[in-house]
Image (cartoon, rainbow, N blue to C red):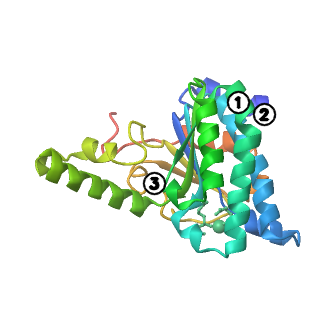
Amino acid sequence: MSGERLERIRVNGDVPEHVAVIMDGNGRWARARGLPRHLGHREGMKAVREVVEGAVEAGVRILTLFAFSTENWRRPAQEVSALMGLLQLYARKEGAELRRQGVEVHVLGELQRADATTRDAVNAIVEGTRGGGAMRLNLMISYGGREEILRAARLLVERVEKEGMEPDEIDEGVFADALFTRGLPDPDLLIRTSGEYRISNFMLWQLAYTELHMTDVLWPDFDREDLYEAILDYQGRERRFGRVTVA
Ligand code: IPE
Ligand code: IPE
Ligand code: MG
């Protein structure tokens, strides 16, 4: 099964270089089983493992996972601490395996809002996987698209005021360089699970021309076959970027 879809992806040839995922539906997965929400998050960690492996297999170069949003800080304290605990667990348990797979982990977001234990664990996985050449994995933690844009605006104002940069010099490239995603191409494909049709403040600048794939599958049930399905869907799209297709 896996081989079949992967084979079709390879034959099609145009593998999305950058895939971003809004991993949603952990709570509903748990509720459907009469379990507490945190067990849904725990199960979601397995899906992360699946998708990272699947993405490496398919030849994706950059995988960006939305793990915790700026707004998620407003969830009950108990759930926030369960999520931070899982992040620590992931960072401690997966580092060695990710290094073996050649996955280089980066963490993007307002990480200073997290507690010291979480920050240390996350920094350790970043350090431990540095130099991995197979795929870059961006974990978006305490990340919000509007926050990121505001932060960039502040950085640029500072450069105008202190470094004498001219406001006219601020073009799309300069602005993009002030975002957390500095130096990265925009996502080619965005996947959102759990049947929600919204962006939820994710990568507002970067998603301008990204192809969207929404699926009803809840994140803990999402596996590499679902990823391959999304890539095949992407490969069937015609990306026009506002232009007309040359006949
Ligand atoms: C996604 O699952 C994980 C995070 C947002 C951290 P949810 O916790 O949002 O699950 P639902 O949407 O309530 O089912
Ligand atoms: C988006 O999911 C955030 C992450 C997946 C980390 P949410 O569950 O927080 O989004 P809404 O509340 O449904 O828009
Ligand atoms: Mg949700």
- Amino acid, disc 3: Met
Percent coordinates x, y for residue 142 in the rendering: 54, 59
The reply to whether callout 2 and callout 1 are in contact (CB within 8 Å) is yes
The reply to whether callout 3 and callout 1 are in contact (CB within 8 Å) is no
Determine the CA span between mark 2 and mark 1: 6 Å
Q: Residue at x 24, y 52 (%)?
A: 156
Q: Which residue is mark 2?
A: 2
Percent coordinates x, y for residue 113 in the rendering: 53, 61
Q: Residue at x 43, y 42 (%)?
A: 186
* Other residues around mark 3 within 10 Å, as few (<14) / some (14–19) / many (≥20): many
Q: Residue at x 77, y 41 (%)?
A: 93
Residue 40 can be seen, yes or no: yes
Quadrant observed for ligand 1 in the rendered image: bottom right
Res. 232 image quadrant: top right
Q: Is residue 225 left or right of residue 189?
A: right
Looking at the rendered structure, the secondary structure element under dot 1 is helix
Q: Which residue is mark 1?
A: 6
Determine the CA span between mark 3 and mark 1: 28 Å
The mark that comes first in sequence, 3 or 2, is 2
Q: Which mark is residue 203?
A: 3
Percent coordinates x, y for residue 36 in the rendering: 83, 71
Does residue 52 lie above or below 33 as drawn?
A: above
Res. 123 image quadrant: top right
Looking at the rendered structure, the secondary structure element under dot 3 is loop
Q: Is residue 84 left or right of residue 235?
A: right
